[in-house]
Amino acid sequence: MLTVPSVPRRIPTFDELYREIERLPEHVTGQILVPGVVSTMSRPGAAHHNVLALCGRALEGFDELLGGHGWWIRKEFEVRFGDRLAVPDLAGWRADEHPELPDDNPLCIVPAWCAEVLSPSTASDDRTLKLPLYASSGVVHTWLVDPELRTVEVYESIGGRPTLVATARDTAVVRLPPFDMELTLGTWWKRPMVPAVAAPGP
């Protein structure tokens, strides 16, 4: 019986996949965490958003754009890693290495630091896909921030592999690489005040 050889499936190019991402609705984020495949996620919930905002505020003293010193820090900015595309919750580039960041989207310069705020819908990808991608691509430090457990894990890229080098939790006051500044984690877990609604009169 004649056997017809199977034809390998052509993997779409980065440009083809990126055009697909550009067509996504505004509230949907597209990434290429596995070569040739677009993955999507909706905007995160309130707990994720709150912790991300408070973490970013704690680092404002380093952000050159906000009058700080030493870093360019971007929130939810597209970064290209070869044939892959990730959108870190926070990413930082050292200002002494990059006096200015190009006005490109996505950015093709590998950050020195990334942070991911975990949520039930993203934690698996953050740990199993994005963390090793960052480490193998040259991101020196990656933080995984868990609002539910109130923890921060700090990973360093050693030999291209993510290696846990520090952890902190709850209300700890700590210095977390690569930032030389005490951070008060207790302020990160605060929930926004909800205005009281007056009960209707009789």
Image (cartoon, rainbow, N blue to C red):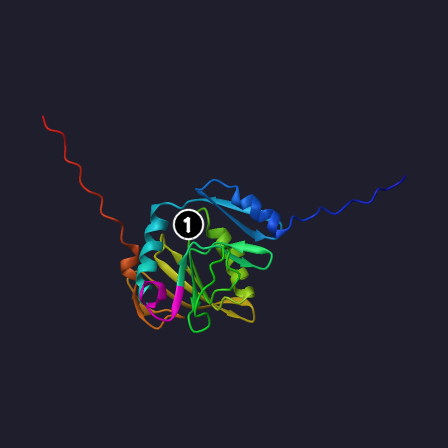
Please identify the residue farthest to the top as the structure is shown: 202
> Element at badge 1?
loop
Label 1 sits on what residue type?
A: Ser
- Number of marks in the rendered image: 1
Left or right of 184? Residue 199 is: left
In the rendered image, the quadrant that contains the C terminus is top left
Residue 29 in picture, x, y percent from top left: 47, 46
In the rendered image, the quadrant that contains the N terminus is top right
- In the picture shown, does residue 74 fall above or below 11? below
Does the rendering let one see residue 64?
yes
Please identify the residue farthest to the left as the structure is shown: 202
Does the rendering let one see residue 63?
no
The residue lying at 61 percent from left, 52 percent from top is: 14
Q: Which residue is mark 1?
A: 119
Label 1: how many residues lie within 10 Å, few (<14), some (14-19) or many (20+)? some
- Which one is nearer the viewer's eye here, 101 or 50? 101
Residue 16 in picture, x, y percent from top left: 61, 47
Residue 157 in picture, x, y percent from top left: 51, 69
The residue lying at 17 percent from left, 40 percent from top is: 196
> In the image, which residues are magenta?
62-72
Please identify the residue farthest to the right as the structure is shown: 1
**Is 14 part of what is drawn in magenta?**
no
Left or right of 88? Residue 189 is: left
The residue lying at 39 percent from left, 68 percent from top is: 71
**Is 67 part of what is drawn in magenta?**
yes
Residue 104 in picture, x, y percent from top left: 49, 57
